Image: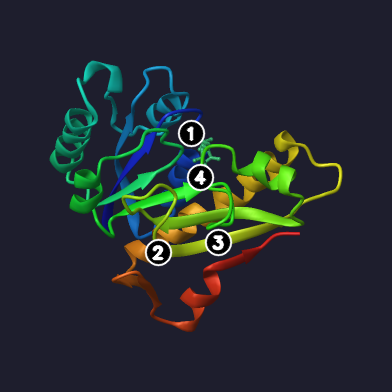
Amino acid sequence: MRALGVLISGRGSNLQALITASEAPDYPARIALVIANRADAGGLQLAAAAGLPTLVIRHQDHADRASFDAALDAALRSAGVDLVCLAGFMRLLTPGFVAAWRDRLINIHPSLLPSFKGTDGPAQAVAAGVRIAGCTVHMVRAEMDAGPILVQAAVPVRPDDTEATLAARILTAEHIALPRAVALVASGRITIAGEQVHYHDAEAAAAASVFLA
Ligand code: GRF
């Protein structure tokens, strides 16, 4: 059983997907701590309602990124966390933090990487006129929105989609992809060697590609 730390900045719908998944008796991870960098992050209420320990570590209270990341690191370690999930966490982490949690640090991004990195994946997809969009769950590397891809989920882009309608469809896919990727990693059915992802059985490999109509 892995102890999961979840870092959030906002509403926390991906956190809620993890909470719901981790309540199943056979789920291979339990949420040990939820940390937000903003006291007004809606996800804090979701965590509290689920009876989970929460912490607010405000980035404004730290002189620099290294000091903020050191506070995150200390809190995660003292909670016994061994797998960290960025679920709508809108801060860039320092290379030192990323190295310390290498292959134990998972991010969810609302595009099919390596397309459309950055904060506005759905808007970029609409602007580019792609017909398939989606989300990516990946191991974090120092470069933003890069790293070994664990699970991707694809959704159609409709001709009348706006950024908001596409983002909502992608979000539905995120809520499937994130708990699934965490389960695959936590159960040891996915491992990372260098930049390569190894799927240890055919079922795990099949679970890495999600197609939603
Ligand atoms: C999601 O779209 C996630 O992919 C992105 O930020 C959003 C967070 O949403 N990184 P929520 O807070 O999980 O509802």
Mark 1, other Cα within 10 Å: few <14 / some 14–19 / many ≥20: many
> Which residue is denoted by mark 1 in the rendering?
12
Query: Does any atom of ligand 1 lie closer than 8 Å to the CB of label 2?
Result: no
Residue 131 figure quarter: bottom right
Proximity of marks 1 and 2: CB atoms separated by less than 8 Å:
no
Queried on whether the Cβ of the residue with tag 4 lies below 8 angstroms from ligand 1, the answer reads yes
The amino acid marked with disc number 2 is Pro
SS state under label 2 = loop
- Label annotation for residue 17: 4
Q: Report the front residue among 183 and 153.
A: 153
Q: Which mark is residue 152?
A: 3
Depicted 46 relative to depicted 16: above or below: above
**Circle 1 or circle 2, nearest the eye:** 2
Query: Do the residues under discs 1 and 3 have CB atoms within 8 angstroms?
Result: no
Do the residues under discs 1 and 4 have CB atoms within 8 angstroms? no
Q: Position of residue 100 (x, y in %)?
A: 18, 51
Question: What is the distance, in whole Å, between disc 1 and disc 2 at their CAs?
Answer: 24 Å
Type of the residue with mark 3 = Gln
Query: Label 4 vs label 2: CA separation?
Result: 22 Å
> How far is mark 3 from mark 2, CA to CA?
11 Å
In three-dimensional space, the C-alpha distance between marks 1 and 4, rounded to whole angstroms, equals 9 Å
Of badges 1 and 3, nearer the viewer stands 3
Which residue does the numbered mark 2 point to in the structure image? 148
Q: Is residue 36 above or below residue 120?
A: above
What's the CA distance linking mark 1 and mark 3?
20 Å
Q: Say if residue 189 shows up in the picture.
A: no
In front here: 152 or 16? 152
Q: Which of the image's four quarters has the N terminus?
A: bottom left
Q: Crowding near pointer 4: few (<14 within 10 Å), some, many (20+)?
A: some
Classify mark 1 as within 8 Å of ligand 1 or not, answering yes or no: yes
